[in-house]
Image (cartoon, grey):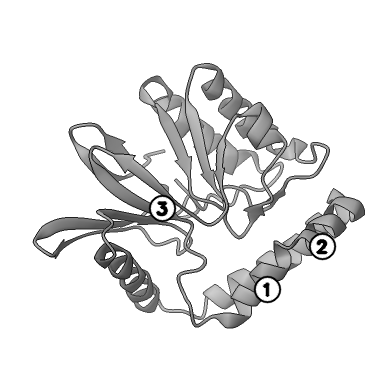
């Protein structure tokens, strides 16, 4: 799952995710979060996100029951350390990763680097994730950093709004096809907020692309079950 963009003290959006995790908890082995689970999260030296406590309590409960968490950083939640690594024992990926399931090699990423022509964003991303920026954020503290992040989030949403759904779909499918031609069996992305499920025949074998969508409008997620493979679903409130 990805792109819930949970906000601190927003009980309604957190409760929806909590209900989903409670429903799935009994049969859940691994929870894979593909970024932007939170509207903003940065790994400060001290815990700074008490407003997320309801959903964090549920994640802690799942971990205590043996559920593993894999977290790929998004463009709203990054510098993940401290709490996620130490308390939740999460496996953290910064950009992309490879997962092996059922004999298939799976490419996984948040998807904010799909558009290789968006040089301005890529430059901004490098600056934002640089050591000097991390040093500044940790020293100015959560209060100021959250205000800046809120402004940048609004700018980001405004930019995304200028793209048609068709153009977004085409852009992500093209990126997925490139990875599949490199030899991956499955490509899983997020970031676009558009659920997608596609199958292709490449070099005589079946290959798949999924976008897990979001938890703002679609409440979509991708399920994997051994022996049954992948299936896109939507959580019914």
Query: From where the camera sits, is residue 222 visible?
Result: no
Judged from the image, the secondary structure of the residue bearing numbered disc 2 is: helix
Judged from the image, the secondary structure of the residue bearing numbered disc 3 is: strand
- Quadrant containing the N terminus is top left
Q: Residue at x 60, y 29 (%)?
A: 89
Question: What is the x, y in percent for residue 166?
Answer: 34, 76
Residue 124 image label: 1
Question: What is the x, y in percent for residue 11?
Answer: 64, 38
User: Rounded to the nearest whole Å, what is the CA distance between mark 3 and mark 1?
Assistant: 22 Å
Which residue corresponds to mark 3?
108
Question: What is the x, y in percent for residue 145?
Answer: 82, 57
Query: From where the camera sits, is residue 31 visible?
Result: yes
User: Rounded to the nearest whole Å, what is the CA distance between mark 2 and mark 3?
Assistant: 28 Å
Does residue 56 lie above or below 184 as drawn? above
For marks 3 and 1, the one nearer the N-term is: 3
Which label sits in the foreground, 2 or 1? 2
User: Rounded to the nearest whole Å, what is the CA distance between mark 2 and mark 1?
Assistant: 13 Å
């Amino acid at each position: 799952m990805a792109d819930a963009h949970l906000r601190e003290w927003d009980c309604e959006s957190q409760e929806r995710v909590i209900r989903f995790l409670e429903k799935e908890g009994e049969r859940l082995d691994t929870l894979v979060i593909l970024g932007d689970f939170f509207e903003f999260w940065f790994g400060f030296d001290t815990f700074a996100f008490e407003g997320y406590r309801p959903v964090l309590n549920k994640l802690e409960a799942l971990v205590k029951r043996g559920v593993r968490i894999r977290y790929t950083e998004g463009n709203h939640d990054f510098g993940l350390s401290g709490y996620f690594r130490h308390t939740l024992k999460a496996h953290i990926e910064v950009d992309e990763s490879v997962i092996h399931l059922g004999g298939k090699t799976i490419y996984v990423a948040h998807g904010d680097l799909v558009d290789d022509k968006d040089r301005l964003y890529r430059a901004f991303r490098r600056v934002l994730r640089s050591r000097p920026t991390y040093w500044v954020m940790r020293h100015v503290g959560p209060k100021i950093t959250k205000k800046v992040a809120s402004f940048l989030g609004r700018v980001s949403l405004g930019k995304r709004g200028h793209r048609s759904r068709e153009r977004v779909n085409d852009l992500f499918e093209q990126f997925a096809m490139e990875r599949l031609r490199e030899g991956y069996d499955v490509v899983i992305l997020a970031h676009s907020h558009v659920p997608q499920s596609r199958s292709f025949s490449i070099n005589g074998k079946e290959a798949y692309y999924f976008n897990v969508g979001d938890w703002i409008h679609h409440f979509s997620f991708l399920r994997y079950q051994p022996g049954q493979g992948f299936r896109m679903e939507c959580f019914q409130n």
